[in-house]
Every structure is written in structure tokens, then in C-alpha cells.
Image (cartoon, rainbow, N blue to C red):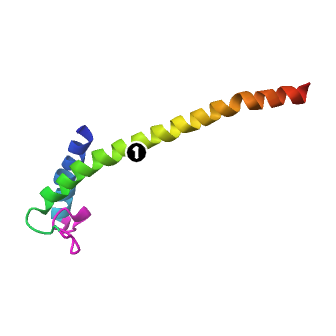
Amino acid sequence: MFSMSIIVLYHFVFLQTVGYFTLVNLNCILCPAISDPLGNRFWRIAAFTHQCILVPILSKSYSYYGQVIASYLVAAHEEKGPETKKEEEKKIN
């Protein structure tokens, strides 16, 4: 949640201030994009709610699949380990 609060502060404090004074819609912070389907008056709340739900789900799934792949690779490496050692011993003898 700390990282999400940093993102919110960055958007609402930094980007909105810079966008307001330069009249540039940085990262769609001043007004919603033309193609935004949630472009009503609550579009910021909808966007941050979407991010609060999506970011943890994606990061947890990324971690989970990374652990699954890593454990598979470790298991595959452990299975090949003794065989390659036996082959090397045969080549030496």
C-alpha cells in the first residue's frame, strides 16, 4: 500500500500541479482522455480504484508464476545434475 500511496501523491501533487501551470494534460491527470469510457465526473476515483485492484492482483500473480517457474527449473536442474556427473566420470575413466 505504500507504493500505491506514492503513486497517488505523484499524480495528485506533482503531475496535477505541473499540468495545471503548463496547461498540459500529463498522464490524463487534468481531464480524462477522449477515448476513456469512464470519462464522467468520477473518473479519477474509478481510475485509482481500478489500479488499487489491478496492481496487487498482477503483482501477486507475477510472483506466484515466477516461483512456479523457478521451482520447476530448479527441479529440472537437480534431475540432470547426477547424470551429467556420471557421464563426466565415464569420459575421464
Q: Residue at x 21, y 75 (%)?
A: 34
Relative depth, front residue between 60 and 33: 60
Q: Residue at x 34, y 48 (%)?
A: 58
Which quadrant of the figure has residue 59?
Answer: top left
As drawn, is 63 to the left or to the right of 51? right
**Principal SS element in the magenta part?**
loop
Image position of 22 with respect to 8: above or below: below
The residue that mark 1 highlights is 62
Image position of 40 with respect to 49: above or below: below
* Amino acid found under the numbered disc labelled 1: Tyr
> Which quarter of the rendered picture does the N terminus lie within?
top left
Q: Residue at x 20, y 43 (%)?
A: 5
Write down the region rendered in magenta.
22-37
Image position of 12 with respect to 93: above or below: below
As drawn, is 39 to the left or to the right of 63? left
Relative depth, front residue between 3 and 82: 82
